[in-house]
Every structure is written in C-alpha cells, then in structure tokens.
C-alpha cells in the first residue's frame, strides 16, 4: 500500500466531517501492518470540549475492530497548508500506533511525512506505568 492511496482515503473521509461549529473539515486514514485502511473524520459537539478529532476517530475505529499494529496515518483538511495533529492526537497516535509515518497533506495534493517521535519527542507511555502496576500487584 503506497502513501498516495492512504492520502486519498484521508481526503475522502472529510466528507462525513461533523463540524457545524468550526466548519473545519478533517479526514484521517490509518494503515494497519496487514494493509487494511480505517478512516475517520472530526466529530464536533455542542459542548465543544467533547469534540473528537479525525485522527482519534480513525484509530479508535481500528482498535475497536481488533487492530493492534499500524504503519502510517494520513491527515487531510481543506487548507492549503498542512494540518498537523493536535497535541492530544499526538499522544494517542504514539500510544496506540507508536513511531509510525504521519502524513500531513494540503488541499493541493502536496504532503510531507514525519515520524510520531518527531511530532512528540520524549513521550509518556505505557512503560512509565510499569512501576505503578508492580506496586499494585
Ligand atoms: N481537528 C482534527 O480533527 N484534527 C486535527 O489534526 C486538528 C483539529 C478538528 C477538531 C475540530 O473539530 C476542528 O478540527 C477545529 O479545531
């Protein structure tokens, strides 16, 4: 699976964006190690803080279907400049997918690829909870 195909899925996923408050449509597509694609869009809420970004929708859909291994995620908006994932999504990408390719796209079809660790250096992760687990056992 090439990144170009993943990008076109992210772009298509914008179609279902539920963004009546910001009017900022975002689509994401995550690629599993076995070559499957899961898409997601941002889903806003009238209680703004409950909004879920496109990246998390896509990843949560995949994980809830049993997926555990990922290689890339593509993010698309209607902007002419690349839309990077928000801080919360960086944490979720790192936690669930690890150091994968994060593909940031523009409306004009350009894209740049970064690793998760470039977007989120020195991340908090499950390994930081190991001591906690040990003391509770
Ligand atoms: N949003 C995403 O879905 N992904 C991003 O990477 C950036 C922000 C959404 C959240 C909200 O619905 C809208 O874009 C404006 O912040």
Image (spheres, grey):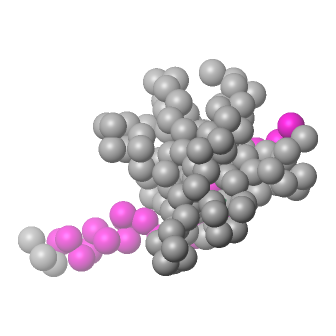
Q: Residue at x 37, y 44 (%)?
A: 63
Residue 44 horizontal side relative to residue 126, left or right: right
Q: Which residues are magenta?
A: 109-134
- The quadrant of the picture occupied by the N terminus is top right
Q: Residue at x 54, y 45 (%)?
A: 40
Percent of width and height locating residue 94: 52, 57
Residue 112 visible here = no
Please check the rendered image and state whether residue 100 is part of the magenta-colored stretch, yes or no: no
Residue farthest to the left, as pictured: 137
Q: In this orientation, which residue lies closer to the viewer: 105 or 19?
A: 19
Counting every numbered tag in the picture gives 0
| Relative height, residue 18 to residue 121 (above, below) | above
- The quadrant of the picture occupied by the C terminus is bottom left
Task: Specify the quadrant of the image occupied by residue 89.
Answer: bottom right
Please check the rendered image and state whether residue 121 is part of the magenta-colored stretch, yes or no: yes
Percent of width and height locating residue 104: 75, 48
Percent of width and height locating residue 34: 46, 24
Q: Residue at x 37, y 71 (%)?
A: 128
| Relative height, residue 132 to residue 98 (above, below) | below
Residue 131 horizontal side relative to residue 78, left or right: left
Residue 83 horizontal side relative to residue 85, left or right: right
Residue 34 visible here = yes
Residue 73 horizontal side relative to residue 47, left or right: right
Q: Residue at x 42, y 40 (%)?
A: 62
Q: In this orientation, which residue lies closer to the viewer: 13 or 33?
A: 13
Q: In this orientation, which residue lies closer to the viewer: 18 or 124?
A: 18
């Amino acid at each position: 699976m090439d990144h170009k195909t993943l990008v076109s899925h992210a772009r298509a996923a914008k179609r279902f964006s539920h963004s009546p408050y910001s009017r900022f449509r975002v689509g994401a597509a995550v690629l599993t190690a076995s070559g499957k694609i899961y898409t997601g869009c941002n889903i806003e809420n009238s209680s703004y803080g409950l909004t879920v970004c496109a990246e998390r929708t896509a990843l949560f859909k995949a994980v809830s279907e049993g997926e555990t291994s990922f290689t890339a995620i593509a993010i698309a908006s209607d902007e002419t400049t690349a839309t990077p994932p928000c801080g919360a999504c960086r944490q979720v990408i790192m936690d669930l997918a690890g150091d994968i390719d994060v593909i940031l796209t523009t409306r004009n079809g350009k894209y740049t690829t970064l690793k998760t660790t470039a977007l989120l250096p020195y991340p908090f992760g499950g390994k930081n909870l190991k001591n906690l687990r040990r003391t509770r056992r």
